[in-house]
Amino acid sequence: MNYQRAATRVFLFSTLLGGVHIFAQEFSQAPNNYEGVATLSVGLGAPIGNRSLTDGCSSSVRFVLGASGSVQLEDGSTRIVPMIVNEGQGAVDMYNDCTGEGDNPDYLDELETIVVDDDGEIITAQIFGDNYFELYINGQFIARDNISFVPFNSTAVRFQANYPVTVAVHMADWETHFGVGMEYASFNVGDAGFIANFNNGAVTNSDWKVLPIYISPLDDPSCVIEDSFGNANASACSIRPSCADGDPAMCRALHYNIPAGWTESGFNDSNWQNATLYEADAVTRAPGYANYADRFGEASFIWSPSLKLDNQVLARFVIEAP
Ligand SMILES: [Ca+2]
Ligand SMILES: [Ca+2]
């Protein structure tokens, strides 16, 4: 039984008794017994290696390797956090502090068309991810972010694909304290965000669908609410749980499964949540986005319900023929 069903049962029980007070009392006790569809991990994992395509930075900006980590779940299995990366090619730099002068004025000339369907529409997109994304079109891997963690870069891609064009993005807010969703020496709970503008008119907005996969740090996972489909909403959880300031080894994480075939055109995402929109100021003021805000047109920053605690998120959007 998941948490939502338990809460519904309590509500029906209390309605029958006609007692709102009883409902409130029972409800406040229910979250102590999290029985959701995710698997729990507690405490810190171990680093497993560097996965950034850009593996150093000669400029004066701070560079932090985007290493991944391994954490053990309560069922004995292991997960890679913040996500398993695809070893495929990188996108073209629009802005990258670690290559050249930062700004890449020739980025459009450097784009190669990645063919998904050779009779399809040729589409160019500008993309900024805090911190990392991998892009799939109609189920085919297109490119990944060149810097997994910091500094904040921005990129462009070009592909040829038939309508309807299914866009699938695998995204992560990176971490250095593996398994507890925190970064830097101070165990900071970092935030995320993703924005993209396609030159056929598609933009990131609330019509996109999202699925949070990895949620941390949590003192008690029962603050995460699941809907009837098992979709997680961590927006009611503290963005500064006591474990983060106290003993991070006591912080908990929830790990949901990545659905098979989630990048494919035929995948049914109708039960996923709609994306939550975030103000640009809430996501980043980094030059990789701020210097190019106009190139993102009407696009909005999207993520799942918790910009801070949802560290691995899947997103999908289907672009219909104009
Ligand atoms: Ca990045
Ligand atoms: Ca985070």
Image (cartoon, rainbow, N blue to C red):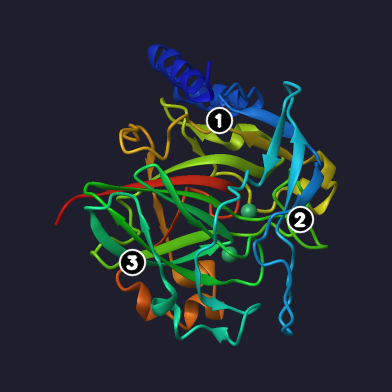
From the viewer's perspective, is 180 left or right of 212?
A: right
Q: Position of residue 47 (x, y in %)?
A: 80, 48
Q: Label 1, label 3: how many angstroms apart (C-alpha)?
A: 31 Å
Sequence-wise first label, 3 or 2: 3
Q: Is residue 320 visible?
A: yes
193 vs 160, left or right, is: right
Vertical placement of residue 76 versus 43, above or below:
above
Task: Establish if 197 lies above or below 305.
Answer: below
Which element is circle 1 on? loop
Depth check, front residue: 19 or 258: 258
Left or right of 81, for residue 6? left
Q: Is residue 34 above or below residue 238?
A: above
Is the C-beta separation of discs 1 and 2 under 8 Å?
no
Crowding at mark 2 (Cα within 10 Å: few <14, some 14-19, many 20+):
many
> What residue is disc 3 on?
124
Classify mark 3: helix, strand or loop.
strand
Instruction: Report which residue position mark 1 lands on.
Output: 257
Task: Give the image quarter of residue 189.
Answer: bottom right
Residue at 59% across, 23% down: 30
Callout 3 environment at 10 Å: few (<14), some (14 to 19), or many (20+)? Answer: some
Residue 220 appears in which quarter of the rendering? top right
Mark linked to residue 176: 2
Query: The residue under label 1 is which amino acid type?
Result: Asn
Pick the residue in front: 48 or 193: 48
**Disc 1 CB within 8 Å of nearest ligand 2 atom:** no
Q: Is residue 235 in sight in this rendering? A: no
